[in-house]
Image: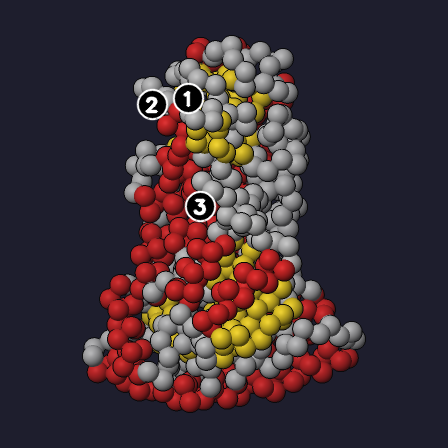
Amino acid sequence: MMQTYCPSLTRYQRWQTREVMVGNVGVGGKNPIRIQSMTTTDTLDTIGTIDQSIRMINAGCEIVRVTAPSVKEAENLQAIRDGLREKGYYTPLVADIHFTPNAAEVAARIVEKVRVNPGNYSDRKKFEIHDYNDETYAEKLDRIRERFIPLIQICKEYGTAMRIGTNHGSLSDRIMSRYGDTPIGMVESAMEFLRIAEDEKYHDIILSMKASNTQVMVQAYRLLVKTMVLEGMNYPLHLGVTEAGEGEDGRIKSSVGIGTLMEDGLGDTIRVSLTEEPEAEIPVAQLLVNRYEARKNHEPIPEINSIPYDPFFRKKRETNTIMNIGGDEVPRIIGNMSRKDLITYHDLIPFGYIYSENRDKWQISDQAVDFLFIGDNSIDFEIPGTLGIIQNHISLEDKERHFSFYSLDEKSLIDKNKISFLNICSDISSSLIAELSQFKKTIFVLDTNNEHGYADQRRFFIECMKKTIQNPIIVKRSYRQCSQDELLLHSATDLGGLQLDGFGDGIWIDSSHDAGYVNETAFGILQASRSRISKTEYISCPSCGRTLFDLQETTAKIRARTNHLKGLKIGIMGCIVNGPGEMADADYGYVGTGAGKISLYKGQDVIKKNIPAESAVDALIQLIDFHGDWIDPADV
């Protein structure tokens, strides 16, 4: 049975939401996808916040969010708003509220929109599990209603919009007790507030389901849409991945989450949360949004009437294991050297292999490709033991770990007793797909020429599942006309999105950009989609007015000391608001808890409190070492 969370799985079209006016900016309806960001200044620093807001607006920010952790900051929003208007800037402001309903009620009289977190607006989080029966649970909902309705009434009176923004990291103990740390819990957390607003005939609402885990984030948004559709609602969606991080990693992670949803037409406004200056977020968001302006004109893809998988729960597609591809193996990465005239030892360095002539040995990095496609070329030296070589079948050499590559037109030439690779375009007919089941030792390389390639390739996976074809599939995408930034964001969306649904036993990025950059991007996509871990993962929030230390500087220091700890997850949080929760699956946490003070976590447990910031990074290293997770950096 079809599980509805988007208008179509094969035809690009935006999910039609109701329009919500945020000041003079329309969100949802027929409006374009809006771009927003958040200030990082102290909200009581009026001039600094105004100046930063102007930089954001000039960069293309359409909605500016400002933290208001207390009534004092909420009241100062008036001075900030007035200062912007005096300078000719009428961009709507949003007050970001956690824990303090009284601050929300002040802000709602001043700014164009308030954001409330249902996890901490009324409930308090003590990380305690309670056994609620229906009666006691209903009593808690009545308490929420009492706290929430005054804000609704103010918003109705002043024409103020609202975002009900669930954070995976700050679900209330009440929600956790009943639904657990799950997408269902995230959705229900928001729906409780939304149903109250509907009862009060207040509809100027936007919703969000943010998480640092891209799998959880995508599943939660999908489930939210399905729930709203079942209840006859269509409120606009604000998309974002919390604590995405910095640099390429942050951009990849954001694209995997946001882009996957936008491919299915979900999202009316987005924010790319980077641990950088807020104006740096805007060009990234613009690149993501711009891709969908002409998407409606893509080549038609046959409709899908039913799906053989659960889009709200990730389960890897069942495949046979061929060599180290498929089955329970991690997704493999194929590098491309087919355009090289002469391949030398040195050419393998960008692909993670360094040859030492003195020791006559290969050094293999944690981000070494698994296979190299060399086309009609040849390699005249002994390759590393972990590397496979793929050659066009007419040029195949009788060498160890060398495999044939065929086009679909050449499938009749395949020796069914030998391992081979078959290149397939995802628009092939259903009957031709059925023929592929005869090639038991063949790995499929799935390509697409459709502008809506994500949906086109997804349809091929669905067809294979329906026909119980279990060959491993490498997903290939070409980005030969893209800028480097477009390559990063588009490949993360196209390849990472399929990984989130368990589709793909490997990835192959075809690009004319630097081979090392392409390789790092490929590994970054698998890391961001949580399908293959090859390096340390940093869950670091973007700075805001609540931040209690320099996030960018501190993140750089921690990364410099720990980036060799493959597979370790380290949370770096500027304050306590989302800290412990958003680090849900982090191994260690570094959280600001006061001016110049840091608390260190092992998982969800506070280990050391109020450490002076100047010695906190050293203390973090000592904590990692104490628990046996530290290794000395290797000499390279």
**Residue highlighted by disc 3:** 492
* Residue 552: quadrant of the picture: bottom left
Whether 205 is drawn above or below 361: the answer is below
Which residue has dot 1 on it? 374
- The correct choice, above or below, for 294 with respect to 22 in the image is above
Q: Position of residue 120 (x, y in %)?
A: 58, 77
Q: Residue at x 62, y 32 (%)?
A: 326
Structural crowding at the residue carrying mark 3, measured as other residues with C-alpha within 10 Å and reported as few (<14), some (14–19) or many (≥20): many
Q: Is residue 184 visible?
A: no
> Is tag 2's residue or tag 3's residue first in the polypeptide sequence?
2
Percent x, y of residue 151? 51, 85
Chain-order first, disc 1 or disc 2: 2
| Mark 2 residue element | loop
Residue at position x 57%, y 39% in the image: 503
Q: Are marks 1 and 2 in contact (CB under 8 Å)?
A: yes
Residue 164 % position (x, y): 51, 72
